[in-house]
Image (spheres, helix red, strand yellow):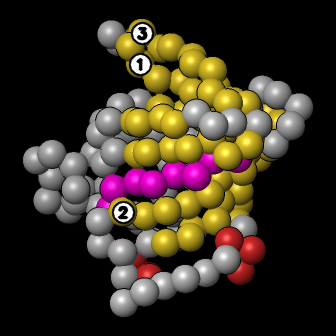
Amino acid sequence: MVYIVNREQVSEEPLLKRDAKSTKVRYLIDKRHGANNFYLRIYEIEPGGQTPHDQHPYEHEVYILRGRGKLLTMVNDVPTLRDVREGDVVFIAPNQVHQFSNPNEETFQMLCVRGAEGLGPGTEKAAVEEEGEASSC
């Protein structure tokens, strides 16, 4: 199977998960398209917005497409804010606490590849998306 779509053909929708705010997502590739191992999304975080404060058993690979933002992670159990900007590549390991935010005046956009459900170490069917609740990067 081969699936090809232009991102403009994929509807943009608000990310309605926990403490996310002013964030939109386009679900480019996921299980609806036959993907069993990885999902691909584009997130747009408006000024003052953020993704949910998240932690789950699958990894993420993130490429910053546009703008600048902040990434909250834990380093030695200490909350740590890191700057990210256009062209940066970010790896988020399974079970790593993370949250992207945009304290700047321009839109922050990122491409996110994430592991499908059940791919984390020692998991069987972890991180199942609940009906009507979107998963985040």
Question: Residue 103 got which mark?
Answer: none
Place of residue 7 in the rendered image (x, y in percent of width and height, measured from the top left): 68, 71
Q: Is residue 101 visible?
A: no
Specify the quadrant that holds the N terminus: bottom left
Mark 2 vs mark 1, CA separation in Å: 24 Å
Question: How many other residues sit within 10 Å of disc 1, few (<14), some (14-19) or many (≥20)?
Answer: few
Mark 3 vs mark 1, CA separation in Å: 5 Å
Q: Are marks 3 and 1 in contact (CB under 8 Å)?
A: yes
The residue that disc 2 covers is 38
Q: Which residue is drawn at 56% across and 44% down?
A: 63
Q: Are marks 2 and 1 in contact (CB under 8 Å)?
A: no
Secondary structure of the residue carrying tag 2 is strand
Q: Indicate the quadrant where residue 78 lies.
A: top left
Magenta highlight on residue 127: no
Question: How many other residues sit within 10 Å of disc 3, few (<14), some (14-19) or many (≥20)?
Answer: few
State the predominant SS element of the stretch in magenta.
strand
Question: How many other residues sit within 10 Å of disc 2, few (<14), some (14-19) or many (≥20)?
Answer: some
Question: Residue 74 got which mark?
Answer: 1
Secondary structure of the residue carrying tag 1 is strand
Q: What amino acid type is highlighted by mark number 2?
A: Phe
Marked residue nearer the N-terminal end (2 or 1)? 2
Q: Which residue is drawn at 76% across and 37% down?
A: 67
Place of residue 122 in the rendered image (x, y in percent of width and height, measured from the top left): 10, 47
In the figure, 131 relative to 24: above or below? below
Q: Is residue 88 left or right of residue 93?
A: right
The residue that disc 3 covers is 78
Q: What amino acid type is highlighted by mark number 3?
A: Val
The magenta span reads: 109-116
- Look at discs 3 and 2 and give the one toward the viewer: 2
